[in-house]
Amino acid sequence: MRLQELIIRTCLGMAIAMVFGLAAEARMEDPGSGFKDPVTGELAVSIERYTVRPNDTLYAIAKRFNTSVRALQSLNGLRGAHLLFAGDALLLPRLDKTEFVAYLVKPGDSLFQIARRFDTTVEALQSLNGIGDRNHILSGQTILLPQSRIMRDFAYGITLFPDLESTPDILRWVKELGVNWAKIEVNWADLEPTATDFAFDSLDALIAGLDQLGIQILLNVYGAPQWSRSSYTRQLNSLLRANSGPPENLETFATFMSVLAGRYAGIIDAYEIWKSPNLLKYWTAPVYEQLPTMGASGDYGFPDKIKIGAAYYVDLLKIAYEAIKSVDSGALVITAGLAPVGFTDNYNAVETGEFLGDMIREGATDYSDGIGALFGASAVPPTLFCCEQPPGVDTHYESHLQYFTEILYLYRDILSRKASDDIPIYITQVGWGTTEGSNLAIPASGLEWLRYTDQGEQALYVAQAYDIAYRLNYIEGMFLYNLNGCAVGDSEACFFSLVDAAGVDRPALQSFAETEKAATYTT
């Protein structure tokens, strides 16, 4: 090892040791002080002192200062549910300036796996954390991860629903948000209600306006029209008839994608192919062992099977990829974001990680330029790790799929093991819903978690999530769900909409507008 490198690593280790020593003694110099980076001379760790108030909790303090419970525990040498007392001194990390982030070691983790996941080296982790034996780390241990000061391209996106009458308002909001990407929800059934009879007016207007603003565009295409799957839907039970799914003949989709991509060649930058294909709601392709008959109730029974699974989806992806590239070779093709599902029954759903792994085995990376990921069915703050119960969240916190960072790590881990670390991940849908403000409905059964997040928390979580995603070098971009779901009458999307059903801006709109779109730190 060169002498200069040894000196740099020694200085870094001493700086971190000093931070933790100060934390343990609950001492602090003037607020805003820190330690100099031995290479650049700039602040390596920026911290400030906070005096605990009556009734304070680590969670409340973390939320107030836009940080995480893990970071507070790491910086102050705290473990578990540490009791705070009024008058105690805590050190607060300034995450906008810090050069290090805290990571909680999970069962099965090794330094090699962590280093690969976060684009660093085992030696750097050992030096930064004073770890002598590279083969010995403990589950539950907190280690620091290094960050570098580099700029990179990142897609700051917002999801839009086409609406011809409100297009001028949509464009005004997009401009105010300062995003560089927009994702447009494109329901094939709306664009081609009958075969070869197209309705492009709303989409044309929105795309033209976004293109004029210099916004890059992702089209999320899903939902085959009824005429393309008539024998599927004709004898479906009424409970399933409203579900969408692929066409019976995949060549029908290829024809549509050729028309769509040809119409917007050179304008549309990327296509996301389908939506949540691991969920019955978006993949109703029934299989009958014998033709169904109408029952006494006047309705049909349920199919014997559903053709759901990665193999079926990759067939659709391949045909869409080839159709798009044949008319617009420069357009990116992104795989569908998968629904966060924790079980597999091969009828209603396929578990997220299982479906992703099967997609890769079936060749999805040969027919795509990036992998889509989805996060949204949760009220858990994005800074938390599985699976401690957050205050005010009574249910839907028990699974790792309800934690933002855990979803990201899941995708990264599966891709690095089964495909390649070089494949970019696009978070094509992210958001926290709220029942506050004006909505179009009350949460249906199974959506109770929407009640746990108030509008202030929604705004905070959006800002925190973008900060986290940008810092992870393997995330290429993220699309917030959504701007105008209420305005187009989508009752479920309305809970997430930045503009509520009364046309009032939710606080999350301003929070997202103020989110730094040119952040300078990344892992």
Image (cartoon, helix red, strand yellow):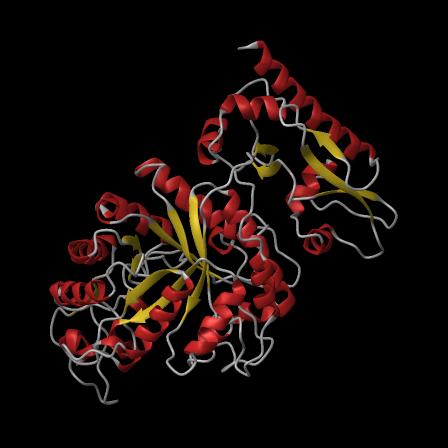
Task: Report x, y in % for residue 354.
Answer: 33, 49
Q: Give the left or right position of residue 51, taking residue 171 as reference.
A: right
Whether 257 is drawn above or below 36: the answer is: below
Give 360 or 82, whichever is nearer the viewer: 360
Q: Is residue 503 visible?
A: yes
Judged from this view, the residue extending furthest toward the front is: 212
x then y, percent, for residue 475:
44, 46
Q: Residue at x 15, y 63 (%)?
A: 254
Q: Residue at x 49, y 72 (%)?
A: 172
Q: Residue at x 36, y 49 (%)?
A: 353
Q: Is residue 234 above or below residue 461?
A: below
Is residue 496 visible to the viewer in this orientation of the structure? Answer: no
User: In the image, residue 289 lies at what x, y percent?
Assistant: 13, 68
Query: Residue 61 or 93: which is nearer the viewer?
Result: 93
Closer to the camera in the image, 508 or 173: 173
Position of residue 61 relative to residue 284, above or below, is above
The structure residue drawn at horizontal position 58% and vertical position 38%, both measured from the top left corner, is 104
Quadrant of the image occupied by residue 317: bottom left
Q: Nearer the viewer, residue 222 or 182?
A: 182
